[in-house]
Image: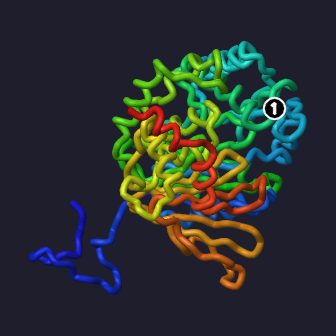
Amino acid sequence: MRKTNENPQGQENPQGLYRESFEHDNCGIGAIVNIKGVKSHSTVAGALEIVEHLEHRAGKDAEGKTGDGVGILLQVSHKFFKKVCTPLGIHLKDERDYGVGMFFLPQDELKRNQAKNIFEVITKKEGLNFLGWREVPVHPEVLGKTAVDCMPCIMQAFIERPEKVERGLDFDRRLYIVRRVFEQSSDDTYVVSLSSRTIVYKGMFLVGQLRQFFGDLQDEDYESAIAMVHSRFSTNTAPSWQRAHPNRFIVHNGEINTIRGNADKMRAREETMESGALKGELHKVLPAINTSGSDSAMLDNALEFMVMSGMELPLAVMIAIPEPWVNNRSMSQNKKDFYEYYATMMEPWDGPASILFSDGDVMGAVLDRNGLRPSRYYITDDDNLILSSEVGVLDIDPSKILVKERLHPGKMLLVDTVAGRVIDDEELKEKYANEEPYGEWLDSNLI
């Protein structure tokens, strides 16, 4: 039973400034991004420091040695992977000329070898050149017994980009198909991430164990311009290695309360779905949503499917998590038409949620339309944007801070590291709202 500070009449006995009525349990999220896209190890180290300061937002077992889950999403560091793969005989060409897969494989050697073999066969069948496996250096001795008992064998796979396939999204789409075919062929292996742009390191950790467990994250040569972190407080699913965040595109603080309907409606649409980007191969990636995942994982599945089908990531997030538009008198008609048009195709994924998302080129954040989860950010004079569930997660010299702000309900923030700038909610949404004549389409076709 929870201890309270209430007297028998049900009134609080305040202790200093503390009020139990303001107490909430939820995950911790954070990100550092260099706006100009300059990669450095300090971005990685700073993000790890953020998540270590979010201990009060993370769950742990009764023994206090195993956490609900902690993880980090980073850009693939060419400098680092070139260094560690050369001694293994894995020849990597230039940046984004290869994809890196992070795998949670079975500890049983026979099952592990079977899974690896299946993945290699599928990669070859999909017309890609498999380069090799790397066992990720880890330190299980820092973990609690509960985490070690269910710990997978963690390995990385490397796949070469074919010359006829463009760098970036086009290549990642090929990797997406490989992963989805593999996931339907192998039950006991979890693909944490498989991309030429991003990679995820995560597990069933306490906040301080992420840095200690993965040797890669301590290497000064691991450089990234984007780093997103998450400390998990399991709200509606039990903790496991797989359920730790980040997912493949997002980290999420909160709950999606409409998740059952969202997942069911996505499944129902699959019979009539078409995609120019996945022409002739759509059947390989369906069903788009794994309904055994958490609410966060299912939202991530939906966003990933939308992006791989040809939609830009910020647009996919706008459609899935719209701002309140029906009775908003201050909103432009173009934006209202945009939201009304997409409301005919997808219902909102609704609930108290703050979401950070990244595809390795952009990093953005969005708050649910009721603004029920906090997200605050700073922009510093050295072109860094630091965002988290709360302030005080990183020790920053106040004289270096140019902007102090928070995300507002239903609003979005985007950092484009390729263009080297921050795009605010108004500019971003007006851009998408004006791309097509949504109002004309509604007048002509809406019944």
Q: Is residue 62 visible?
A: no
Q: Residue at x 71, y 14 (%)?
A: 121
Between 371 and 79, which is closer to the camera in this rendering? Answer: 371
Between 261 and 437, which is closer to the camera in this rendering? Answer: 437
Q: Quadrant of the N terminus?
A: bottom left
Which structural element holds mark 1? loop
Q: Residue at x 42, y 36 (%)?
A: 344
Q: Is residue 102 visible?
A: yes
Q: Please say if 119 is above or below 194.
A: above
In the rendered structure, the answer to whether residue 390 lies left or right of residue 173 reads: left
Q: How many marks?
A: 1
Quadrant of the rendered image containing residue 4: bottom left
Question: Residue 261's spot in the image, x, y percent?
Answer: 34, 35
**How is colour applied across the structure in the image?**
rainbow
Q: Please say if 150 is above or below 111.
A: below
Q: Amino acid at mark 1?
A: Glu
Question: Residue 184's spot in the image, x, y percent?
Answer: 54, 19
Q: Residue at x 30, y 77 (%)?
A: 19
Quadrant of the rendered image containing residue 132: top right
Question: Residue 317's spot in the image, x, y percent?
Answer: 54, 46
In the rendered structure, the answer to whether residue 91 lies left or right of residue 204 reads: right
Q: Please say if 403 is above or below 276.
A: below
Question: Residue 35's spot in the image, x, y percent?
Answer: 74, 62
Q: Which residue is mark 1?
A: 166
Between 115 and 212, which is closer to the camera in this rendering? Answer: 115
Q: Residue at x 60, y 29 (%)?
A: 105
